[in-house]
Image (cartoon, rainbow, N blue to C red):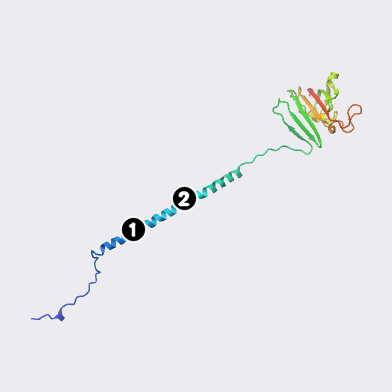
């Protein structure tokens, strides 16, 4: 029979397994996890709020500039309209007729000479064009109103061909566009009438002449 000696007892060896969590350490771990979760939530909330603020200011601060830019672009793309009047080195005609059958006033400029035309009555017949033969009644006066010639006194219309130079330039130019039955007043400067020479005993030199003309026929 053998007796165990203290040397023969097996020695206690440390366990290779880690120590298990004890009840005292469990609450501390739970608290740490909760703190981390709260911190993460606060960080995410702060990021969302900052992003929303940045987006808000970027959108609303740029809107007025975009609006102004759009308005400027619209103004640039809109067609611009302007009123132009035809001009010519030889003549400029201005018509202020309201309608075809409404009396009108016009001015014909040739060089420094100005021929004024005023329709008292607009005719409804044939319109006068260059080269046509016309028949008219007329009354001629000076600037002071003194009458110097009249076909009415002779009771006979005056006939001529327009544009052939058989009458003064003021007549060749002034009757164009008249219609049979119409009545027109012509104020003719000396350059388009009898000029500096005039007609001795009848028309003074450099005289401005006024003619009241009624168109009887044109063909």
Q: Looking at the rendering, in which quadrant would you find the C terminus?
A: top right
Q: Is residue 156 visible?
A: no
**Disc 2, SS:** helix
Q: Name which quarter of the figure residue 30 lies in.
A: bottom left
Total residue callouts: 2
Q: Rounded to the nearest whole Å, what is the CA distance between mark 1 and mark 2?
A: 29 Å
Query: Which residue does the image show at 60% across and 43% down from the upper left?
Result: 75
Q: Position of residue 102 (x, y in %)?
A: 71, 25
Q: Residues within 10 Å of mark 1 (few under 14, many from 20)?
A: few
* Location of residue 69 in the rendering, given as x and y in whole percent from the top left corner: 57, 47
Q: Which residue is mark 2?
A: 56
Which residue is at 80% across, 28% downward?
186
The image shows residue 107 at horizontal and vertical percentages of: 77, 32
Most foreground residue, 194 or 209: 209
Quadrant of the image for the N terminus? bottom left
Closer to the camera, 75 or 24? 24
Other residues around mark 2 within 10 Å, as few (<14) / some (14–19) / many (≥20):
few
Q: Residue furthest left?
A: 1
- What number is the disc on residue 142? none
Residue at the image point whose x is 84% and y is 21% from the top? 151
Task: Specify the label residue 37 is tagged with.
Answer: 1
* Image quadrant where residue 28 sits: bottom left
Q: Is residue 56 visible?
A: yes
Helix, strand, or loop for circle 1?
helix
Question: Horizontal placement of 74 versus 203: left or right?
Answer: left
Question: In the figure, 46 relative to 169: above or below?
Answer: below
* Relative vertical location of residue 86 with respect to residue 7 in this rendering, above or below: above
For the view shown, which residue lies furthest in the right direction? 200
Dots 1, 2 in contact, CB < 8 A: no
Residue sitting at 31 percent across and 60 percent down? 33
Could you say where residue 215 lies in the image, as x and y percent from the top left? Answer: 78, 23
Mark 1 or mark 2: which comes first in sequence?
Answer: 1
């Amino acid at each position: 029979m053998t007796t165990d000696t203290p040397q023969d007892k097996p020695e206690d060896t440390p366990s290779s397994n880690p120590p298990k969590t004890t009840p005292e350490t469990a609450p501390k771990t739970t608290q740490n996890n909760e703190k981390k979760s709260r911190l993460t939530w606060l960080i995410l909330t702060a990021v969302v709020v900052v992003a929303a603020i940045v987006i808000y200011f970027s959108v609303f601060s740029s809107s007025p500039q975009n609006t102004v830019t759009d308005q400027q672009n619209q103004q640039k793309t809109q067609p611009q309209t302007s009123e132009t009047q035809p001009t010519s080195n030889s003549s400029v005609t201005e018509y202020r007729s309201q309608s075809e059958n409404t009396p009108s006033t016009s001015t014909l400029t040739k060089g420094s000479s100005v021929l004024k035309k005023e329709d008292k009555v607009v005719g409804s017949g044939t319109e006068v064009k260059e080269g046509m033969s016309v028949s008219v009644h007329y009354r001629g006066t000076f600037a002071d109103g003194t009458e110097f010639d009249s076909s009415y006194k002779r009771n006979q219309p005056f006939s001529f061909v327009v544009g052939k130079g058989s009458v003064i330039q003021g007549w060749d130019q002034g009757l164009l566009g008249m219609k049979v039955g119409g009545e027109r007043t012509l104020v003719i400067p000396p350059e388009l009438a009898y000029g500096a020479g005039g007609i001795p005993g009848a028309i003074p030199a450099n005289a401005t002449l006024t003619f009241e003309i009624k168109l009887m026929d044109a063909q």
